[in-house]
Image: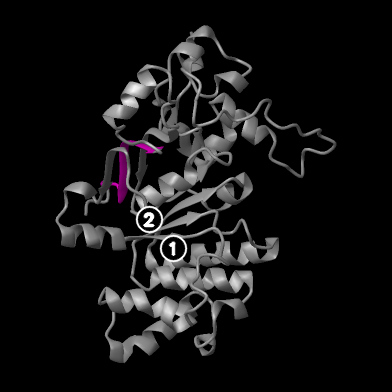
């Protein structure tokens, strides 16, 4: 793989939940006003994203903006409604069954809730070793040693491998999830709010583990979070999402120093800082609109203090405004 080729790329990826082809009889009922059309949730709206090998990309946005949906599509856990997902430059949907299988193994997911993401009926050695055995990453004779190595790598005592998930703390369960993901030797981890459910002290330990694994294994990360402080600490590049669309993307230094999109500016203005003493913090005005009925034009315009008529009618294009800095805002066209 060329180092200039993204490990993962999404092209105009959209995801609509509840979408289906109606029966002709339903069309007749809807035409006469006797039946409402099925509600469709527009979770993602033509999202373009690139993640380069070895990069840590932070994906940020409010709850319900589509971050987790995008992560699950990237990792192959959810089908997309339209668009393309490319792995190592190849469209995943056009690969042979064997090649698609290998592409899916390259990307593994760490889930938010370590209490729900582990099978309570399986011991830790089964949770960590099952996928590695099924996908022929290790033989049955070497399986026990392999599981011990994965647990050590994730910071767990291998002597605990015959226990069940309920016998561990939240931080230990998350380490089990990390060991399970590493067992199939992935190139990329999609971390979906992987530290949000943990105590602050445990969060720091897990974040340090992620960074250590990056150095040791050359891992790539898509780090999904609503915590800008965490994203600033671990990321090389930050992508901001709002209601199913990417509104800004830049290096972590550039985005935190020079946010361009009004939504990004509003988010960063409310990040607690030691220097900002006696500051009154206020939430972004208004509520995030429903993905069942997103507003026309720029999705952020109902909450934007700079909204113009054009914002209400035309969706802005995500375009480069500086080297490596892209933003989707009509204000960038105003001279």
Q: Farthest residue toward the left?
A: 96
Q: Are marks 1 and 2 in contact (CB under 8 Å)?
A: yes
Front in this rendered view, residue 294 or 272: 294
Front in this rendered view, residue 266 or 62: 62
Residue 151 seen: yes
Residue linked to disc 2: 54
Position of residue 315 relative to residue 115, above or below, is above
| Residue in view at x 29 percent, y 34 percent | 21
Q: Tag on residue 25?
A: none
Q: Residues within 10 Å of mark 1 (few under 14, many from 20)?
A: some
| Residue in view at x 75 percent, y 31 percent | 282
Q: Quadrant of residue 61?
A: top right
Q: Position of residue 214 (x, y in %)?
A: 44, 63
Tell me where the magenta segment starts and ends, as one range: 4-16
Q: Is residue 167 shown left or right of residue 71?
A: right
Q: Quadrant of the N terminus?
A: bottom left
Residue linked to disc 1: 214
């Amino acid at each position: 793989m060329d180092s200039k080729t993204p490990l993962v790329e999404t092209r105009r990826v959209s995801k609509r939940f509840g979408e289906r082809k109606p029966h002709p009889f339903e069309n007749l009922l809807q035409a006469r006003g006797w039946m409402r059309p099925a509600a469709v949730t527009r979770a993602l709206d033509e999202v373009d994203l690139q993640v380069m090998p070895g990069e840590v990309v932070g994906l940020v946005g409010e709850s319900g903006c589509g971050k987790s949906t995008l992560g699950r599509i990237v990792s192959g856990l959810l089908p997309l409604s339209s668009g393309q997902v490319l792995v190592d430059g190849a469209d995943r949907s056009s690969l042979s069954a064997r090649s698609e299988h290998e592409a899916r193994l390259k990307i593994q997911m760490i889930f938010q809730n370590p209490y729900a993401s582990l099978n309570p009926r399986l011991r830790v050695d089964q949770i960590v070793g099952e996928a590695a055995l099924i996908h022929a990453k290790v033989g049955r004779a070497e399986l026990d040693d392999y599981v011990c190595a994965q647990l050590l790598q994730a910071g767990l005592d291998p002597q605990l491998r015959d226990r069940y998930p309920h016998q561990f703390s939240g931080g230990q369960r998350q380490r089990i999830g990390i060991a399970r993901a590493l067992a199939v030797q992935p190139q990329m981890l999609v971390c979906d709010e992987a530290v949000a459910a943990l105590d602050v002290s445990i969060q720091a330990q897990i974040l340090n583990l992620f960074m250590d694994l990056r150095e040791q294994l050359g891992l790539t990360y898509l780090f999904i979070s609503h915590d800008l402080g965490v994203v600033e600490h671990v990321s090389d590049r930050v992508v901001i999402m709002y209601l199913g669309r990417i509104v800004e993307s830049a290096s972590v230094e550039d985005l935190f120093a020079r946010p361009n999109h009004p939504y990004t500016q509003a988010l960063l203005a409310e990040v607690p800082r030691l220097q900002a003493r006696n500051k009154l913090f206020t939430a972004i005005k208004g509520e995030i609109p429903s993905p069942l009925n997103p507003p026309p034009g720029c999705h952020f315009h109902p909450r934007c203090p700079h909204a113009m008529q054009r914002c209400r009618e035309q969706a802005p294009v995500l375009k480069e405004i500086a080297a490596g800095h892209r933003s989707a805002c009509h204000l960038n066209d105003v001279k």
